[in-house]
Amino acid sequence: MSSSTSILPAIRYVRTVGVPAEKAFQVFTESFISWWPAGHHLGEADLADVVIEPRVGGRWYEVGVDGSECDWGRVLVWEPPHRLVLTWQISGEWRFDPDPEHASELEIRFVAGEPGQTVVELEHRQIERLVAAQAAYDGVGSDRGWSSILDSFVAALAG
């Protein structure tokens, strides 16, 4: 980060879901495609799946209907069913950036709430590290960004 780059505040959202943390974590990590918006992909092919490899250092990537793969980031923390931290290596130009120095971080916490409920806390931070950071910040912070994506996650768990 250059000294002229300003720090962008983290983007945070909280949602409560009507399932235990184990189920919320499982759907978030193993059934990503069941709630992720189909139009939110980087590859040329339509989205067939999104994979989070269940280990520190694992890949986080999309799979196109043609079998092509496009990385999104890496797993930094894997603590089922309570916490997941991923690198977000998607620039504000909406392309994968392989340089880990340009990666922001996405942390998702699954906190037990009332019986049978989980509070899902999402924080996207260090966005200023991304190429075209302001565009990325504006995108993930918009109505079509994390807020609506988490609403899709909540709906998938309720259905």
Image (tube, rainbow, N blue to C red):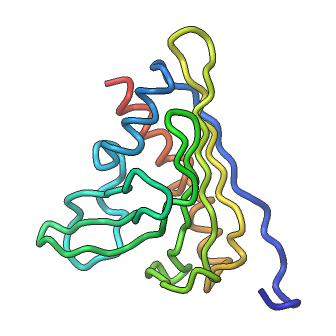
Q: Position of residue 98 (x, y in %)?
A: 48, 84
Residue situated furthest right in the rendering: 3
> Which residue appears at 55% of the width and 53% of the height?
143
Vertical position of residue 129 compared to residue 13: above or below: below
Q: Position of residue 145 (x, y in %)?
A: 53, 57
Relative depth, front residue between 65 and 24: 24
Q: Position of residue 108 (x, y in %)?
A: 58, 45
Name the side, left or right, on which 30 lies relative to 151. left
Vertical position of residue 111 compared to residue 115: above or below: below
**Residue 128: quadrant of the picture:** bottom right
Residue situated furthest left in the rendering: 66
User: Is the N terminus in the top left, top right, bottom left or bottom right quadrant?
Assistant: bottom right
Relative depth, front residue between 71 and 8: 71
> Which residue appears at 55% of the width and 86% of the height?
99
Relative depth, front residue between 108 and 75: 75
**Residue 96: quadrant of the picture:** bottom left
